Amino acid sequence: MSTTIKASKLSMQTRNLIREVVEGIKIVPHPDKEMIPLSIGDPTRFGNFQLEEEVMGKLGELISSYKYNGYTHSCGYPEVREAVAKHYSTEEDPLTADDIVLASGASGAVELAMKSLVNEGDNILAPRPGFSLYQTVAENNGAETKYYNLLPDQSWEVDLEQLDSLVDERTKCIVITNPSNPCGSVYSKEHLLDILAVAEKHGLPIIADEIYENMTFEGVPFFSLSELSVNVPLLIVGGLAKRFLVPGWRLGWIHIHDRNNAFDEIRVALGKLSQVILGPSTLAQCIVPYLLNEVPQSFHDETMAKLQESAMYCVERLEKMQGLTVIKPEGAMYVMTRIDIDAFPDFKDDREFAQALISEQSVFVLPGQCFLFDNYFRIVFCATKSMLEQAFDRMEEFVNDHFVKEE
Amino acid sequence: MSTTIKASKLSMQTRNLIREVVEGIKIVPHPDKEMIPLSIGDPTRFGNFQLEEEVMGKLGELISSYKYNGYTHSCGYPEVREAVAKHYSTEEDPLTADDIVLASGASGAVELAMKSLVNEGDNILAPRPGFSLYQTVAENNGAETKYYNLLPDQSWEVDLEQLDSLVDERTKCIVITNPSNPCGSVYSKEHLLDILAVAEKHGLPIIADEIYENMTFEGVPFFSLSELSVNVPLLIVGGLAKRFLVPGWRLGWIHIHDRNNAFDEIRVALGKLSQVILGPSTLAQCIVPYLLNEVPQSFHDETMAKLQESAMYCVERLEKMQGLTVIKPEGAMYVMTRIDIDAFPDFKDDREFAQALISEQSVFVLPGQCFLFDNYFRIVFCATKSMLEQAFDRMEEFVNDHFVKEE
Ligand SMILES: Cc1ncc(COP(=O)(O)O)c(C=O)c1O
Ligand SMILES: Cc1ncc(COP(=O)(O)O)c(C=O)c1O
């Protein structure tokens, strides 16, 4: 037998845009400068953001009890789902364990949610700039991603008219990311209501990716779509990765926020889909009630205070650089900056800009192309203060080396 | 908005046969008898099979190091894949980290493997009786499952001629489970070579589910297909669930055993598919090298000695019961028993038999229908000796109550 085995169509068309762009970049840092990666949305990377030791001890204890080695319900331990339900319940919108599906990270949750909704040939509406996962999952299911625009000059709000115009008879859902990766934006109540109105007009459900829920800066309130939707059924995606600083644990969830029993069938579908890989690891599941109930608010407050400080420092430094326009973030861990590309004639686009920043200064930022948004770059502001200082010193030098004043 | 949101076709056709049959059974145990579940393939259920405390301590230690909280490569930590590769390498068939894809349990591994191979409308060949997962995953991908027969009177060997006759132009792979769930059978080298010959004749790859590798009784050697295949490319599926008694941890893997570079494209496809949910939990990944390298052989020997003792006890008891014919297992955790259904006129089929066994005697066995094999039942022999004793005493009473001698 010497024939090649052909891979399936859907597997070969499964693309991860971030990886593709990054793999197309020559990542060869300057030999004399240590690499500063401001590229990966992993808050654990620099050791400055982590859960308290108590939590790790508690997890060790739970594991040693031998109670968490066996199979669970495919949607997760009932008591864990119960804890999640309780945590996210409001008086107007009470949840039960049956409304919660645990999954392998928010990624697994998005996969289940989208798979329950789309057939081959359908489409989903997703934000641009936006996180590449939605497209990856859509393509993996043979569906198309249509992009609605976020407006950088309006704090990355949705272009509602354009969103509305994208809907066709094969559109199966709208994906909303709030707070946003890569923008660091946080939507107001009014704007969320406007988005809901578009969804309601077309009878579309929303997959609301709220993995950065409550990760907003001082004075910026976070509203979950679940608090605001009267008639639009929602699959809210969340998990431990960002708020609890453990992305590797792969623990995410869907809350089914049904409205008018629109999701009767979707609920069944999610249950069926969960039976394929049988839920996330018990090692991560078992600590969820403790994390939600016992980790004090002060932990989250401190995390956010540090993130905000870093964010403001980034903005302050970037604002001073010629040819760049930073769009102030209000939460999450990201800030987007516009490159006046005509002022940098050495570079054709954001990709070349980012690549040269690596080779000359060993500073790694993701080009906007990773989020389908040209001539921007995204910075993850989780690095330590001293690393950020160094990174921006180098970036300043880089900008000064390449910026050409327009006459 | 009062319209119902329709679920996708593929999600709704995703069925888990075991659940369907079990949900169709009224599970109402006899009120005076405690339930003895011999139904679930979960060795942790009764507390008599577990990892040593040292391992749990080691895991707690690793977790406390804060080294395993971040994102990993989508196929898993390189050093963990390296450890798996090394463990399964042979001189003739060396593996590297690139040949290993870590996944969410063996289930996740089967899902990745099958997804990389099948398009909608394709088919796979799977064993009957067999584990329902293959059909679940195939249906989830729009593929059909065609069943090749295992022959109970030939130690559950494959009906090779019938297997051969099933192949058509849409057949994408053969799934082999060895040792077998639900049969507890273990194939000889010769039989595996015969199976390979059929695959080679048709140019088909094999997905070899070897999650029960080395779980064989004394004197019964285990051969991995990887040792025997000269020309048939293999995706070997395995994981921690059964051998290390931690199914809840959801840690499985694929070894890519390529032959003649047939899998160049499949390798790429598996990488792409892994980027969707980004690998299994780091909490389970991090202990894999320790489990493979440090857990002594005596642990596995003791597990198997206990399982064999239980198995032999089951056989001994079942052999004495009228109207039943037990097929002696040689490994894994399962034994299948034929019901001479005509000798039990109270019951139409194995499902009614199993249901009455619950309601009259509170003993839960899975009817053969769960594995597409009528008039058998499967027993999981992981329960403690005293539970098994009780279970068989009750089963004996049950059989005596219902058996009617044919004249
Ligand atoms: C918006 C958004 N959704 C989902 C995810 C994936 O989260 P998880 O690691 O839990 O799969 C990320 C990770 O960066 C994200 O930014
Ligand atoms: C033959 C076989 N393959 C795969 C699995 C699933 O293993 P995991 O729990 O690692 O997904 C099982 C579980 O019973 C099995 O019996």
Image (cartoon, coloured by chain):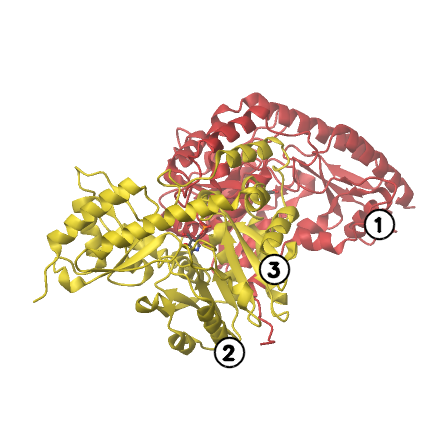
Chain colours: A yellow, B red
Residue A90: numbered disc: 3
Question: Circle 3 sits in a helix, a strand or a loop, which is it?
Answer: loop
At label 2, the amino acid type is Lys
Question: B200 or B219, which is in the foreground?
Answer: B219
Q: Is residue B312 above or below residue B370?
A: above
State which quadrant residue A121 falls in: bottom left
Residue B169, position in %: x, y? 48, 59
Of all residues, the one furthest to the front in this rendering is A219
Q: Which one is in front in this view, the residue at disc 1 or the one at disc 2?
A: 2
Both marks 3 and 1 on one chain: no
Q: Decide if ligand 2 comes within 8 Å of the CB at mark 1.
A: no
How far apart are labels 3 and 1 at the CA level?
58 Å
Image check: A254 left or right of A340? Answer: right
Q: Is residue A122 visible?
A: no
How far apart are labels 2 and 3 at the CA level?
26 Å
Q: Which one is in front in this view, the residue at disc 3 or the one at disc 1?
A: 3
Q: Which one is in front in this view, the residue at disc 2 or the one at disc 3?
A: 3
Question: A210 or A325, which is in the foreground?
Answer: A325
At label 3, the amino acid type is Thr
Q: How crowded is mark 2: few (under 14 residues within 10 Å), some or many (20 or more)?
A: few
Q: Which of marks 2 and 3 is nearer the N terminus?
A: 3
Image check: A95 left or right of B190? Answer: right
Residue at mark 2: A201
* Residue contact between numbered discs 2 and 3, judged by CB atoms under 8 Å: no
State which quadrant residue B85 falls in: top left
Give the quadrant of the C terminus of chain A.
Answer: bottom left
Q: Which residue is drawn at 55% across and 64% down?
A: A227
At label 1, the amino acid type is Asp
Residue A159: numbered disc: none
Q: Quadrant of ligand 2?
A: top right
Q: Is residue B381 above or below residue A285?
A: above
* Residue contact between numbered discs 1 and 2, judged by CB atoms under 8 Å: no
